Amino acid sequence: MSCPAGAPKGGEGPKPSRLLLILGHVGLGLLVTFTLAVVFGGVVMLAWNQIFPAVFNLPALDYGQGVALLVFARLLTGRLTHGYRHAESGRSLAPFKPTAPAREVGLPVAADDSWGAWWRAEGEGAYHAYLARTDDAERG
């Protein structure tokens, strides 16, 4: 069987244009945002009305004020996104390097580490002297 000229092959429908895809995603994002504002605005209103009028003698909120308070709080905290993501920023977190001075708890002290050198030279002795003083103060 052959397809008529201009008909899509293999049962594929016409592909939407890039602009329609972008507009669809924007519209879906706005719909989700509006739905979340509606739901969480009601939660804010109910929580406020249960706590603040009784505890702080403040007036109760209606639904629109709950949504407005939610939006205002998001604006004040500067968080209009879902949070900070290190992978998207191009930076990576530095790997953890333990340099703890306390041998009693089994934390390693690197030989080339200046903190470790100080701990071995002065810090450990001062720490044990402190422990001895506090033990004597508790006993006496």
Image (cartoon, rainbow, N blue to C red):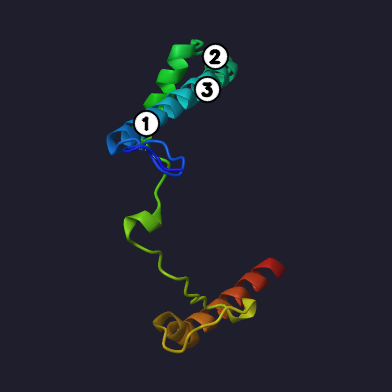
Closest to the observer, 8 or 73: 8
Q: Amino acid at mark 2?
A: Pro
Separation of residues labelled 3 and 1 (CA atoms) = 22 Å
Q: Amino acid at mark 3?
A: Val
Separation of residues labelled 2 and 3 (CA atoms) = 21 Å
Quadrant for the C terminus, please.
bottom right
Residue 99: x percent and y percent? 48, 77
Mark 2 vs 1, N-terminal side: 1
Residue 71: x percent and y percent? 39, 25
Give the residue at mark 2. Answer: 53
Dividing the picture into quadrants, the one containing residue 34 is top left
- Mark 2 or 1: in front is 1
At x 71% / y 69%, what residue is drawn? 139
Give the residue at mark 1. Answer: 24
Mark 2 vs 3, N-terminal side: 3
Residue 105: x percent and y percent? 63, 76
Give the residue at mark 3. Answer: 39
- Mark 2 or 3: in front is 3
